[in-house]
Image (cartoon, helix red, strand yellow):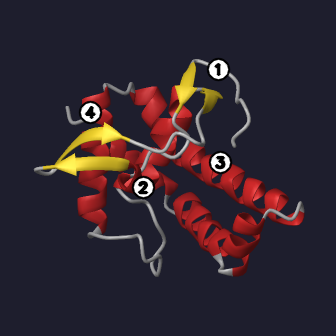
Amino acid sequence: MLPPRSPAETVCHGDFAPYNCVFRGGKAVAVIDFEAAHPGPRSWDIAYALYRFAPFTAPGNPDGFGSPAERARRARLFCDAYGLAPDARERLPGEIADRLQALVDLMLARAAAGDPKFTEDVRQGHADLYRRDIAHIRRHAPRIREALRPHR
């Protein structure tokens, strides 16, 4: 479903999110739903995973939960566990926003081409929800960068 993206470092899941993980006892034990898998940079999946797991959503997004401090803690733990370098963490707010914009662009293109699933998603306001999240992430990028920095 998603086109290849350069640099093609790995095969990205394309939709790495809590709803595509199987949990047992609070731990992820499996990842499912690979219909969006595509070649791309690992940062593309990291960006989307942080958006969904932290989550970095705008107020009013029903998928958001937790205080800003809790979201920051989850995101930093994710980056620490992944071993993400400081320079990669600095780029993440922009990459998260770019990843969401690519999703909006895909939704709109597929809806314009007559795809019923994407037409319905756009009709239900999903593209607008992602646009609000993009604006929120860009507006708060300095705070997100600070939250992602490793503890010294």
**What separation in Å lies between label 4 and label 3 (alpha carbons)?**
22 Å
* Residue 103 position within the rendered picture, expressed as x and y whole percent measured from the top left: 67, 54
CB of mark 3 within 8 Å of CB of mark 1?
Answer: no
**Label 2: which residue?**
52
> Which amino acid type is shown beneath numbered disc 3?
Asp
Residue drawn 30% across the image and 54% down it: 72
Residue drawn 32% across the image and 36% down it: 79
> From the viewer's perspective, is the residue at label 3 or at label 1 nearer?
1
Q: Nearer the viewer, residue 41 or 94?
A: 41
> Which amino acid type is shown beneath numbered disc 4?
Asp
Seen in the picture, residue 29 relative to 41 is either above or below; the reply is below
**What separation in Å lies between label 1 and label 2 (alpha carbons)?**
22 Å
Compared across the picture, whether 139 is left or right of 65 comes to right
* Residue 145 position within the rendered picture, expressed as x and y whole percent measured from the top left: 42, 46
CB of mark 1 within 8 Å of CB of mark 2?
Answer: no
Element assignment for label 1: loop
**What separation in Å lies between label 4 and label 2 (alpha carbons)?**
17 Å
CB of mark 4 within 8 Å of CB of mark 3?
Answer: no
Element assignment for label 4: helix
**Label 1: which residue?**
8
Q: Is residue 115 visible?
A: yes
* Residue 146 position within the rendered picture, expressed as x and y whole percent measured from the top left: 37, 47
- Density class for disc 4 (Cα within 10 Å; few <14, some 14-19, many ≥20) is some
> From the viewer's perspective, is the residue at label 1 or at label 4 nearer?
1
> Which amino acid type is shown beneath numbered disc 2?
Arg
Q: Earlier in the sequence, mark 1 or mark 2?
A: 1
